[in-house]
Image (spheres, rainbow, N blue to C red):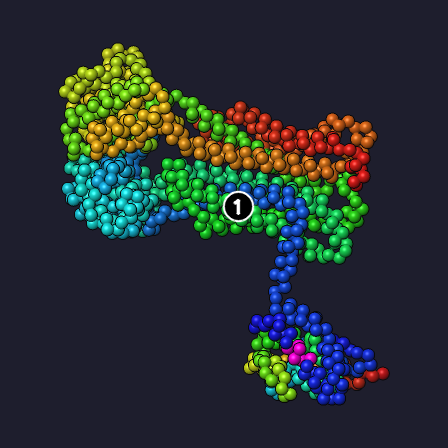
């Protein structure tokens, strides 16, 4: 996970990668590179996904049976491994989102209403 | 989800291609796109490693590395590894083996249905404790009718059968058992069926059950034998089934139904039956005992002639079968536990010394950042490896040794066939390993806690101080003490064995051959025929070259089974008034010829031996032994007494004159004094089964074939059995004691050896630790003998302390072995002296080599090495 030079993109918070992957897969099956791109684009290029940690994360999710994987062919006719959300993963996504929102709310309560700028 | 490393790599390749393609679409040049994609991915290797880690249980991987490392470390000092493994294998192996015997013989239930309900019922004679009688036929029938505590009672008696037809006639040990015996025990036959109740009736046609062993040996395991007839004692018997060998309360080769002949129902004194019973469900042993007691008392009132003085005895069947073996096994098992203890203390000392030497290495590694966790893990693996290999060695050892126990046979060890490595034994071995392992682990943790960066690195190799020394010394002292106790026990047992071998037997066993011949009464119904056969046989053997005298006897010395089975006589002495039944002298009844006494060199003390005139129709005579003579023919009495002998087969109708007194002969065992004995002239008994004894001028075994031929020449269908020299008979009588003494002494010697190794190891180590100190002493002018003295003193103090401790603990050993000693006092001073001497010399021997080495060391080299 690197922040490179003047790059303003933020490092992913620990533990959020799983949530983002699951959320991305909600739109349909996707391969790893596609997932990384999607996260980057949907965050308005604000979040950088470290490709090196993406695959172990996918592997982890696969082991937990939250996603299913299958080799297939990509839009531009290349072999790629496609990941699909399983019913367990779908349920997990709901609870992860809930948890995340609770976390955000509590952090906001601590930070207070005014922006943290001097 | 198992995924291969290749699959994962393929996915990464696919990612890089997709990314590069997209970048190219976004306008990056093709070469840059590839580079950029790779850059964005980060370290491919790291990702792959992370994948690898997620797929493998890392623990195993580390373990494998630790094992390889440990193997290398151990191989660097193979001496330690080998000694440690041998110690563990010996200690755990010996304990496990003895446990397998304890388990098979004492702990495992008997192989019958509901074995806890099975009891042995017998009679005891409080006034004559060596007479432990069984039941007579009428007694047994009365018990069966009256006793309510048992759901059933069954009786059996051993019986020698001659099998004929189908090859050479052969004598086999069998049992006559009441028809319900197998049903009572819950034994199912391998083939066929067991006895029917009707087959236990007197006069019913003969049936027989074969043991599996006999069936395989003589009949080739042919199942079509069922339903066919075989000849037993000249009578046709139909084989109805095959019984697994070793089942049944006696080690029999075949079984026939026990049926009581009418005459037997009148013989209340003929106590030749063993009785087993099954208690009613929920019945207490004590209640059954009380009931049998009252039945015995009431029978004694009704039949005072036969039953007075006898009381009943009910004991668990297992106890009855196991008998005295229990204490013997417990003794041997304790000895192996002591050996294990010594082995472990030894190992602990070895490890302490080894770790002390390695302390500097460990400290440096610790200083370089190896976590304590990592160090413990590495040491742990090292010792686990040693423990595991040692344990496997122990298992191997006990597998081999258990076979030996299994083959011992019931005369050494009852139920020996049931000794095996089963799950209980494996559990025992596993628990033993864990206990040893935990002890070692505690030791290691303690040692690691002592790692102190500064002192160790500074090179403080214990010039004067001796860290951890107290623990090591205590372990050594304990080891010496335990070894001493074992040595003392071994010495006492060996002395007992030697005494037992030297006892006065009452006969001279050297150069005497004996064979037993049993005439079937169907072919030799008349007493004259039997007398004629044996007379002819003795004549034939007599004229053989090298045979000096030939006699006949109905039971050989040292061959009567304990408990008084075998003919027993009750004597009425003329003029002795009306003796009450309880006071009637009882004596072993033996038929013999005069040459029997000559052949065995049994001395005549008074009167005469039998003469050719002591024949069937003449005046009945008897010879008694000195023990009986003290009671009925004291020196003060000149006229010989006249007696009437009552036996199970009937009583004398006329007075029998005692014509002579011979010296006492040990009849049952080497360790039991001669029992009162009455000898009848063979010519007046004409019993069918007699042992022929021949004194020869050279090795009696070389005459066996000739004697066998003489028998077969006379009657080709006559089996000859129990062909052996009397020295073999004596040898066999000592076998159980020899076995037990050998094993115990073996363990004691192992313990002594371990103690020697312990002393040697500790001294060598301590000298290595004190090299600098000793070198300085030598440099300052100490003589070699001074150095030697220092070292030997060090050993002497520890051995001395161990000895003192051992001596204080002697009551433990003495009480333990007391019941195994024969004519040796458990406090025997000689034994103590021998044990002390052995231990001190072993200690000196163990300290001499290190002492010499220390004295020879060149101070310059020693100091430089530091």
Q: Position of residue B728 (x, y in %)?
A: 37, 28
- Name the secondary structure under disc 1: helix
The image shows residue B693, relative to residue B95, as above or below, that is: above
Classify mark 1: residues with Cα within 10 Å, few (<14), some (14-19) or many (20+). many
Residue A14 higher or lower than B29, as above or below? above
- The residue at the point 64 percent across, 67 percent down is B53
Q: Residue at x 76, y 86 (%)?
A: B28
| Host chain of mark 1 | B
Judge whether residue B224 can be spotted in this image: yes
Q: Which quadrant of the figure has residue B484? A: top right
User: B849 or B170, which lies in front?
Assistant: B170
Image-based side of B472 in relation to B461, left or right: left
Q: Quadrant of residue B595?
A: top left
Q: Position of residue B219 (x, y in %)?
A: 27, 45
**Which quarter of the rendered picture does the C terminus of chain B lie within?**
top right
User: Where's residue B707, x and y in %?
Assistant: 28, 26
Give the dominant element type of the magenta stretch: helix, strand or loop.
Answer: helix
Answer left or right for B763 relative to B184: right
Q: Quadrant of the N terminus of chain B?
A: bottom right
Q: Which residue is mark 1?
A: B394
Residue visible at 44% across and 34% down?
B739
Specify the segment rendered in magenta: B11-16
């Amino acid at each position: 996970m690197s922040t490179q030079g003047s790059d303003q993109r933020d490092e992913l918070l620990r533990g959020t990668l799983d949530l983002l992957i699951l959320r991305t897969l909600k739109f349909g099956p996707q391969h790893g590179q596609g997932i990384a791109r999607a996260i980057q684009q949907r965050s308005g290029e604000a979040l950088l996904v470290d490709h090196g940690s993406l695959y172990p994360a996918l592997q982890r999710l696969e082991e937990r049976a939250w996603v299913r994987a299958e080799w297939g062919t990509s839009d531009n006719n290349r072999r790629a491994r496609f990941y699909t959300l399983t019913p367990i993963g779908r349920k997990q996504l709901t609870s992860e989102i809930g948890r995340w929102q609770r976390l955000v709310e509590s952090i906001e309560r601590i930070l207070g209403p005014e922006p943290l700028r001097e | 989800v198992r995924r291969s490393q290749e699959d994962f790599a393929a996915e990464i390749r696919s990612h890089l291609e997709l990314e590069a393609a997209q970048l190219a679409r976004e306008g990056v040049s093709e070469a840059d796109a590839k580079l950029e994609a790779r850059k964005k991915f980060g370290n491919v290797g790291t990702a792959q490693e992370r994948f690898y880690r997620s797929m493998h249980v890392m623990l195993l991987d580390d373990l494998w590395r630790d094992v390889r490392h440990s193997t290398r470390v151990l191989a660097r000092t193979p001496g330690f590894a080998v000694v440690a493994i041998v110690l563990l294998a010996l200690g755990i192996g010996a304990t496990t083996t003895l446990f397998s015997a304890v388990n098979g013989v004492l702990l495992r239930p008997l192989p019958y249905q509901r074995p806890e309900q099975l009891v042995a019922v017998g009679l005891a004679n409080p006034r004559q404790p060596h007479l432990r009688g069984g039941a007579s036929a009428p007694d047994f029938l009365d018990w069966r009718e009256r006793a309510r505590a048992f759901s059933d009672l069954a009786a059996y008696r051993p019986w020698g059968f001659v099998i004929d037809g189908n090859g050479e006639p052969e004598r086999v040990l069998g049992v006559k058992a009441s028809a319900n015996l197998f049903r009572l025990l819950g034994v199912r036959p391998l083939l066929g069926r067991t006895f029917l109740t009707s087959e236990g009736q007197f006069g019913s046609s003969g049936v027989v059950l074969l043991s599996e062993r006999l069936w395989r040996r003589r009949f080739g395991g042919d199942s079509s034998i069922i339903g066919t007839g075989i000849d037993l004692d000249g009578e046709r018997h139909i084989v109805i089934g095959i019984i697994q060998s070793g089942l049944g309360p006696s080690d029999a080769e075949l079984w026939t139904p026990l049926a009581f002949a009418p005459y037997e129902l009148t013989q209340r004194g003929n106590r030749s039956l063993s009785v087993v019973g099954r208690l009613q469900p929920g019945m207490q042993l004590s209640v059954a005992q009380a009931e049998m007691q009252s039945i015995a008392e009431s029978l004694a009132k009704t039949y005072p002639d036969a039953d007075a003085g006898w009381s009943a005895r009910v004991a668990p069947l297992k106890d009855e079968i196991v008998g005295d073996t229990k204490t013997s096994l417990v003794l041997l098992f304790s000895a192996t536990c002591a050996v294990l203890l010594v082995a472990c203390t030894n190992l602990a000392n070895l490890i302490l010394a080894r770790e002390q030497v390695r302390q500097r290495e460990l400290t440096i590694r610790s200083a370089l950042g190896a976590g304590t966790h990592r160090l413990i893990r590495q040491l742990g693996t090292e010792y686990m490896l040693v423990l595991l290999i040692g344990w496997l060695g122990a298992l191997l050892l006990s597998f081999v040794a258990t076979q030996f126990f299994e083959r011992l046979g019931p005369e050494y060890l009852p139920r020996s066939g049931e000794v095996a490595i089963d799950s209980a034994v494996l559990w025992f071995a596993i628990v033993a390993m864990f206990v040893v392992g935990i002890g070692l682990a505690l030791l290691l943790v303690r040692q690691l806690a002592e790692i102190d960066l500064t002192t160790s690195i500074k090179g403080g190799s214990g010039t004067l101080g001796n860290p951890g020394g107290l623990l090591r010394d205590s372990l050594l002292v304990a080891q010496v003490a335990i070894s001493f106790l074992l040595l003392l026990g071994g010495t006492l047992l060996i002395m007992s064995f030697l005494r037992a071998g030297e006892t006065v037997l009452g006969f001279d066993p050297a150069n005497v051959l004996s064979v037993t011949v049993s005439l079937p009464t169907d072919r030799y119904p008349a007493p004259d025929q039997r007398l004629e056969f044996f007379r002819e046989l003795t004549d034939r053997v007599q004229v053989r070259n090298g045979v000096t005298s030939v006699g006949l006897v109905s039971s050989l010395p040292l061959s009567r089974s304990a408990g008084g089975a075998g003919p027993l006589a009750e004597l009425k002495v003329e003029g002795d008034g009306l003796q009450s039944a309880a006071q009637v002298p009882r004596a072993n009844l033996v038929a013999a010829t005069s040459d029997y006494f000559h052949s065995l060199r049994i001395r005549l003390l008074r009167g005469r031996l039998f003469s050719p005139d002591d024949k069937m129709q003449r005046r009945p005579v008897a010879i008694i032994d000195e023990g009986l003579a003290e009671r009925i023919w004291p020196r003060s009495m000149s006229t010989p007494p006249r007696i009437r002998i009552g036996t199970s087969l009937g009583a004398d109708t006329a007075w029998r004159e005692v014509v002579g007194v011979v010296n006492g002969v040990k009849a049952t065992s080497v360790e039991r004094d001669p029992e009162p004995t009455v000898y009848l002239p063979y010519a007046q008994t004409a019993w069918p089964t007699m042992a022929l004894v021949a004194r020869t001028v050279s090795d009696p075994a070389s005459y066996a074939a000739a004697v066998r031929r003489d028998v077969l020449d006379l009657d080709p269908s006559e089996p000859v059995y129990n062909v052996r020299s009397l020295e073999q008979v004596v040898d066999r009588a000592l076998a159980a004691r020899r076995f037990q003494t050998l094993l115990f002494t073996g363990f004691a010697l192992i313990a002594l050896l371990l103690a020697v190794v312990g002393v040697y190891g500790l001294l060598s180590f301590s000298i290595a630790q004190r090299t600098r100190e000793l070198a300085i002493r030598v440099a300052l002018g100490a003589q070699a003998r001074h150095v030697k003295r220092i070292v030997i003193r060090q050993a002497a103090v520890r051995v001395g302390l161990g000895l003192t401790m051992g001596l204080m603990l002697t009551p433990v050993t003495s009480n333990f072995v007391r019941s195994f000693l024969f004519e040796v006092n458990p406090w025997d001073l000689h034994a103590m002296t021998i044990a002390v001497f052995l231990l001190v010399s072993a200690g000196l021997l163990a300290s001499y080599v290190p002492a010499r080495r220390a004295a020879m060391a060149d101070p310059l080299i020693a100091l430089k090495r530091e």
